[in-house]
Image: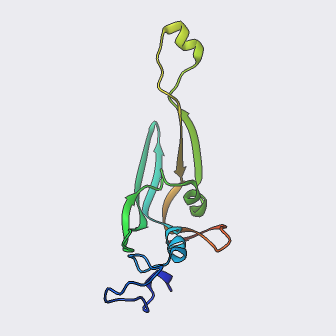
Amino acid sequence: MQLWNCPMRSSGGISVPGIGVDGLTADVRKYRDGIEIYHVQHYRHKRGGDNEYITDITSVGEYQVSGDFRWVRASYQYGPPWLAEAAGGITHSRTIGGCRADDRQIYGQTCRPSQTVTTNDHNGHLRGVFIRFQDHTGAYHIEGVHY
């Protein structure tokens, strides 16, 4: 049952106090918008010699202001860390860019600012649907179904 698809929703242009354009109260909208769902249709990370091949066909579900649900192109590899946890994968963090202070002084270099990049990985092949949601206490829960 989806609280935001209640068959008792008002219709016919009647304005109901506390109900938004999507037919939801603020409390119900908070639960709906707190749901994160990813569909990993195909993820494969293959290494061979000096080469590395990644295939990543992933979508994320999202709700629009009107309340309509749609799937949008996303990425398992660049998805949130909880996604790797739910899928049984791993998360890597690495720093790219930047240079040491003494390199700038010696060679007169200008450096790009460093940034930390976090990526997910999964050895082998991955397919599944993964969800993270908050309960009424604010605690997060994750679930996954591999297929």
- Colour approach in the figure: rainbow
Looking at the image, which residue sits at the far left? Answer: 12
x then y, percent, for residue 82: 58, 58
> Closer to the camera, 46 or 106?
106
From what the image shows, is residue 42 above or below residue 77?
below
Q: Is residue 49 left or right of residue 68?
A: right
Tell me what residue is drawn at x 61 percent, y 59 percent: 85
From what the image shows, is residue 7 above or below residue 70?
below
Tell me what residue is drawn at x 46 percent, y 49 percent: 46
x then y, percent, for residue 118: 54, 45
From what the image shows, is residue 146 above or below residue 18?
above
Looking at the image, which residue sits at the far top? Answer: 106
Q: How many marks?
A: 0
x then y, percent, for residue 18: 48, 79
x then y, percent, for residue 52: 44, 43
> Closer to the camera, 142 or 22?
22
> Closer to the camera, 103 or 41?
103
Tell me what residue is drawn at x 57 percent, y 54 percent: 81
